[in-house]
Amino acid sequence: MMKKRYRFGIVILVLAVCFVFLWPSLSWHFLTSRDQQARALQTREQIRNQAMFRAEADYQRLLDLARAGGDVPEDLAFLTREARRLNRENGLPSPAVWDAHSTLAAFPSAWAVRDAIETQYRDEVFALRNLQRQAVQLGLDLSGGLSIVLQADMAALQERLDRSLTEEDRNDAMERTLQDLNSRIDQFGLTEPVIRRQGPDQIYVEIPGSADPERINDIIMGRGSLTFHIVDDEATAAFNLYYRQNPFTTFDANGNLAVDHAAIPIPADVVIRGVYEQDRYGLNEQQRNADGTLRFSAIRREVGLDGTHIRSALVERDQFGRPEVTFILTPEGGDIFWQLTSANIQRPMAIVLDDRVRSQATIQGAIRDRVRLTGFGFDEANSIAMMLRTAGLPVTLEVVSQQSIGASMGEDTIRQGLFALLGGVALVLVFMLVYYRSAGINAVVAQLLNFYIMFSVLSAFSFTLTLPSIAGFILTIGMATDANVIIFERIKEELRLGKGRKAAVEIGFGKAFWAVMDSNVTTFIAALFLAQLGSGPIQGFAVALSVGVFSSVFTALFVSRLIFDFGSDVLGSKKIRITWSRPRAAREAVGGIR
């Protein structure tokens, strides 16, 4: 009895863990409204603009309520909690009533109120974005999206390197390009892209969901450039002084300098670039000086080093535990960087991405191949390392073909796939109930748990659901039913030999064990090979099938046996209704089959 309780505890634990795995998918697809999903799938810039607009609108609403002596609305109740916290920290007494006026009075400024509202909205949206990333995603054939084939220009790479390319060079260039494309697309928050090599010099990209083709092309084509420039401190100070004195006439409407170098006391070989940093939305925003003016830097026009010479970049910690960015250069890049740093010791150097200064560091000594940048927080260090790794693609890419699959086609495919899946499940369950009578209920419960466990495991890995994946589910259901049929037939054989319920169940499961295991192991081996050798839809089918093999074995041999034992030991059943055939001789001899 203890053994059965132990097995029952394992089943409950598995179901609980699976529910935790499945919860993000349930929350996103069934408990999150369309409006919330639309907000979460906006770009970061749209989220920031929405948060700022809402903060201003809600502040004005609260201000009107304070003037009228009203209470804080329910959707702004978090401001009252924040006001209480501020009062406690400042050692101030709490008012008799926390209405709109007393809540506003607890904040040090109007800006603090707006910032609290904006932060709340931003956190809500980013929590939804995180939930969406954890949920099961719909593939290109179900949700629609873009399918793009890119051609790598190996001839241009050979011309740039000024030597013939070996097979190893080509493979390295393609692998680096694949890695960089993955980083670029992931950095922009696009949903579960499929990026794989196709042939010797082509790359295939799938981006599910609604996406702007022009924006996608800007991302994957890598039009940005990463360069290193020496900063001219004197010219920077001179320009910033001029800009503070002429803030409205220094630049034109397009952000270009509206005056020539003769009007500003800076050398002709210097260019002005804005200094940017990542804001709390993950967007690049131009920094400001203490007086509120935008921050600019004067850098030498000559490129000291470009990003194509960077081999790798990562975030490490120094001896005091502070983050630092370390990047390694190619041998050619190391020689260039040695000359650049040797001639500019104790001068600042700027890292410029897409004509924006993203970081500055003072050169402490001559450096050849391993460069360390310090003075950042951990988040900023990770951002800079990502920028260094992904800014320059190893080869030039051209779009060979681009196809768009509409969402309506995806909806039709989902409907047909679900009908096939649910119809197959229903027919299988009806067959088991009709053919095996009450014992078929055991198979039905095992199948439902099998279905539940499969989706839970796939949800845990944020699996992308495609039409071949649904086919894998349907095949798994058939295999799981086959396991139940083998077990039930073995039990029937034992009952015909005169065994009682408990003995028939025990011997039947024992004899069926290896037959079930052998068939599932061979299927798993085939699925494993498909997953390793296949790609795209084939790989999705193989993964779904592999997960289904494990869950079907568990439910058929473990859960199903527990249900039979529950009927015997707890409900006290002595018979098993497992067949419609009731020959008189067998009934008189055995008495255990009806």
Image (spheres, grey):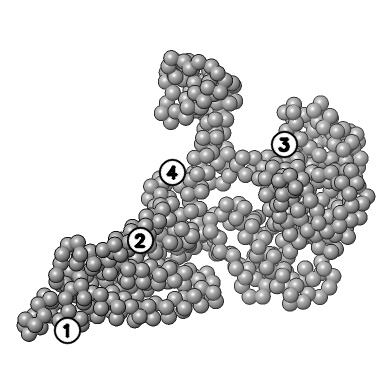
User: Is label 3 in a helix, a strand or a loop?
Assistant: loop
Marks 1 & 3, CB-CB < 8 Å contact: no
**Residue type at tag 1:** Leu
Nearest the eye: 214 or 443: 443
Q: Position of residue 341 (x, y in %)?
A: 89, 51
Up-down: is 51 above or below 37? above
Residue in the image at 55% along x and 60% along y:
193
Mark 1 crowd level (few <14, some 14–19, many ≥20, 10 Å Cα): few
Which residue lies under the disc numbered 4? 35
Mark 1 → mark 3, Cα distance in angstroms: 85 Å
**Residue type at tag 4:** Asp
Residue 426, quarter of the rendered image: bottom left
Residue sitting farthest toward the right: 343
Residue in the image at 75% along x and 72% along y:
169
Mark 2 → mark 3, Cα distance in angstroms: 56 Å
Foreground mark, 4 or 2?
2
